Amino acid sequence: ASYDMGGHDTYMHKEIHEQADAVDRVLRGRIDDRFSTVHLGGLNLDAREARQIRRVKILGCGTSYHAGMIGAQMIEELARIPADAEPASEFRYRNAVVDPDTLYVAVSQSGETYDVLAAVQELKRKGARVLGVVNVVGSAIAREADGGIYVHAGPEVCVVSTKCFTNTTVAFALLALHLGRTRDLSVRDGKRIIEGLRKLPGQISEIMKQEEEIKKLALQYAEARSMLFIGRVRGYPVAREASLKLKEVSYIHAEAYPASELKHGPLALIEPALPTVAIVPDDDLLEKNRAALEEIKARSGRILAVAHQDQEKADQTLIVPKNEDELDPILMGIPLQLLAYHTALALGRDIDKPRNLAKSVTVE
Ligand code: AGP
């Protein structure tokens, strides 16, 4: 496929910059202010069925799996349904127990990833209810699912997914809000989340204004041989995705770890040559995260924080606009997409087509 580059040198750069508009699209026509909820026309799930769900299992690969991890947390927080995400590629090989009271959600940009499709087909064969959270309309996974949500990110050409990740996390926020309001989420909380959702496009545009600053940082990080990404609870999937972004486009080794697990091993790695990127949202875990930064600093580790306010222990902080706590993960990875992009650019990488990778993996 070839689309207009719109003045950008790479599709990755173009797609990163399209995110404010893309998020606007996934929200459009779906918010219901009267009942403080959202309309998701394609779900094919009535209120009675929604109330009977006992668990949610989210399946996807790579970036879509990471978006699903964020989605699982949102569903637990807003709808209070136990939820988790698992790589579809693992799920399909482990003879998982298929439970009739579980809602399965398959996530895919292309809608053609074979590991996800095979998981969906096996689930359907066993009588499970499967929803799709998919970008490409009419794709195999969208057709196979019982219903779902289109994420409306628009065509994504770069092998490295950016705008589709962001839109998928927003689609999950919509699903979590919808399930929440069908169950026990209050009108007040529904309103609060809707207000937060409406702020997202403007906040993404704010993040884009930091590109020059991020570009300078990227020149420093391009020299690193390896990087550590940490986050706690809401910040952890963000760290996972940022680490994948950096490694696939720049070929710099990166590892993501829950901040809470540092002392159980990875702290041994900390030294000046291993920079840490820390996701530090301004939520109830802020003090815990600050303590982790202190641990790293005490061992002369260099720290780049992504946070809502300046972090004293970090060498640099990229400030992200604050939203509602539950929605913060949608925004916190965006500056790190720019960091991965500019690091890869500084290293002269083939940004839109990293070596060894394909946009959609349609084989076993
Ligand atoms: C994303 O940057 C990756 N290239 C890759 O992990 C991708 O997300 C994965 O292969 C899943 O693709 P899908 O969303 O089209 O199913």
Image: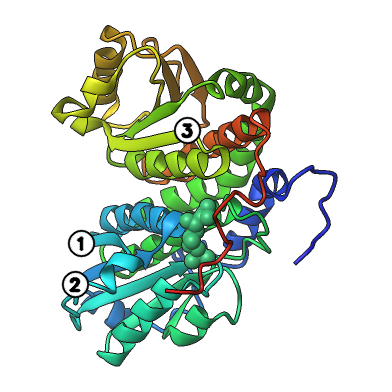
Quadrant in the rendering for residue 178: bottom left
Task: Give the tally of numbered discs.
Answer: 3
Q: What residue is shown at x 53% (from left), y 34% (from top)?
A: 336
Q: Is residue 319 left or right of residue 72?
A: right
Residue at the spot 51% in from the left edge and 24% down from the top edge: 319
Tag 2: amino acid: Arg
Identified by mark 1, the residue type is Pro
Q: Secondary structure at mark 1?
A: loop
Q: Are marks 1 and 2 in contact (CB under 8 Å)?
A: yes
Pick the quarter of the image with the N terminus.
bottom right
What label sits on residue 322 in the rendered view? 3
Callout 3 secondary element: loop
Q: Which one is nearer the viewer's eye here, 25 or 161? A: 161
291 relative to 207, above or below: above
Classed neighbour count for the residue bearing mark 2: other residues with Cα under 10 Å, few (<14), some (14–19), many (≥20):
some
Q: Which residue matches tag 2?
A: 54
Give the image location of residue 203, x and y in percent: 59, 38
In the rendered image of this protein, does residue 70 appear above or below residue 255? below
Residue sitting at 29 percent across and 75 percent down?
103
Q: Which mark is drawn over residue 82?
A: 1
As drawn, 88 above or below 335 = below
Residue 115 % position (x, y):
40, 72
Q: Earlier in the sequence, mark 1 or mark 2?
A: 2
